[in-house]
Amino acid sequence: MRFEDMEVWKRSARLSANIYRETSSLRDFGYRDQLTRSSLSIPSNVAEGYERDGQLEIARFLTFAKGSCGELITQIYIGIE
């Protein structure tokens, strides 16, 4: 299976593109940078895991992607406050 065919990759890539679009006018450059970096890490880690050999590598990078999701959610919650 190609990572581009995976629904999790498609949705997370779309999320990252939306984050870039929606935060383009933020003046807090550090916050914007953190949001975009954590959102970009999600599909990137999914792709990297699937491009490596072996199920353990896939699982490892999916765990990294999940961690980036938690990071992004936390940053959004803080931004709302």
Image: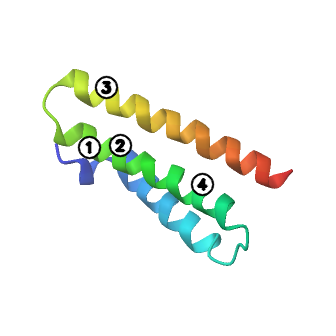
| Residue at x-position 41% and y-position 28% | 63
Residue 47 visible to an observer of this rendering: yes
Residue 7 visible somewhere in the drawing: no
**Residue under the image location 62 percent in, 76 percent down:** 24
Mark pair 2, 4: CA separation: 16 Å
Front one among 12 and 24: 24
The kind of residue tagged 3 is: Ala
Name the residue that disc number 3 marks: 59
Task: Identify the residue at horizontal 59%, vertical 36% (top origin).
Answer: 70
Inter-mark Cα distance, 3 to 1:
11 Å
Distance CA(mark 3)–CA(mark 4)? 25 Å
Task: Locate residue 61, reporting x and y percent.
Answer: 33, 33
Kindly identify the amino acid type of the residue bearing the numbered disc 2.
Answer: Asn
Q: Amino acid at mark 4?
A: Gln
- The residue where tag 2 is placed is 45
Q: Type of residue at label 1?
A: Glu
- Give the quadrant of residue 35: bottom right
